[in-house]
Image (spheres, grey):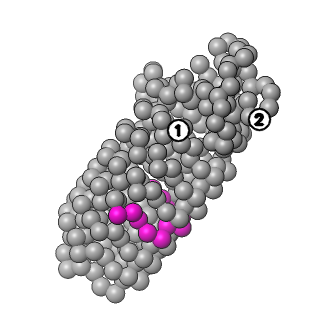
Amino acid sequence: MYLPGDLLEARPFKEASSTTIVHNQDRLAAFLKIAYEYSLVAPFENRKNGAPELSGTLEVKANIVRAWLRINKNSISVLVCHKCSMFCLPSELCELPSLHEIALSENLITKLPSEIEHLSTLHTLLISFNPLTQLPDEIGNLSTLTELYILRNKLTELPNTFGRLSALTDLLLSDNKLSKLPDGFGNLKALTELNLSFNKITRLPDDIEKLSALTKLNLAYNKLKQLPEGIRHHESVEEN
C-alpha cells in the first residue's frame, strides 16, 4: 500500500520488504505536521489501486497519513525529509519498529519527542541545520545508535544520559552552543570521530581520555585553555 506519488513515495531499500518515505514537493511535511496535531484516525473511505485517495478536509488527509503509517509500520526502515519545514518529529514515527535511519536536516525542529527511545533499531540520526535547543533524556536509551549528526543547531548542553550511547561511532556536534560535556562522556568508547568545533566549551572532562578508538577529533574554535594530558598529543586532535 502506498500514498500517491505526489505526496509520498514508497520504494524498496536494501530488502524487498523495506520502505523508504521521501518528501515530494514539500507536501509530506505539511501532512506530518497536521498528523501530529490531530489524534483521530479516519477510515479509508476511498481506495484506488490499493491506495487511499486524499480527498476531503486537511484533518481527514492527515488522519489517512497516520493510518498509513500504522498499517505499514513494520516495513518502513528509512525516513528522509530534508527541507520540509517540519517543526517536530511526530511521536507516531517513534512507533515504527523497523526504522533504522532518520534524516531530517534543514528543518525547523526545536525538540525531539521522548518517545524516540522506542526506536530500538535506529542506527543513524541526521538532524543538522535545525534550531534544536536540547535533547530528551530518553535519547540515551538508543542502544543501537552509531551515527548522530546534530551540526549547526542551538544545543546548550547534552543530557546526563548521553554516556549510555555505547554503540556510537560518529558524533558531529559542531556549531552549537555547548559549554561543557556531560558526566560519563568517556563511556562512549566506540567513538571513532568526534567533532565539537565552533562551540563554547571551556573544559573537557577527564574521562575523555577513555575514548581510545578516536581517529578524528576536532576541537577547533572553542574556549579551551588546555587539553587533558591523555589527548594533548593525540595525532587526531585539531584545535584552533
Q: Which of 67/200 is in front?
A: 67
Q: Which of 185/196 is in front?
A: 185
- Vertical placement of residue 114 versus 203, above or below: above
In this picture, residue 27 sits left or right of residue 68: right
- Vertical placement of residue 95 versus 168, above or below: above
Image quarter hosting the N terminus = top right
Query: What residue sits 23% from the left and 75% below the top?
Result: 206
Please tell me how crowded label 2 is: few (under 14), some (14-19), or many (20+) other residues with Cα within 10 Å: some
- The disc labelled 2 sits on which kind of residue? Leu
Asked whether residue 11 is in view, the answer is: no
Q: Where is residue 102 in the image (x, y as percent from the top left)?
A: 49, 43
Answer with the quarter of the image where residue 223 lies.
Answer: bottom left
- The disc labelled 1 sits on which kind of residue? Leu
> Any mark on residue 160, and which?
none
In this picture, residue 142 sits left or right of residue 61: left
First of labels 2, 1 by sequence position: 2
Asked whether residue 219 is in view, the answer is: yes
Q: What stretch is highlighted in magenta?
A: 149-160
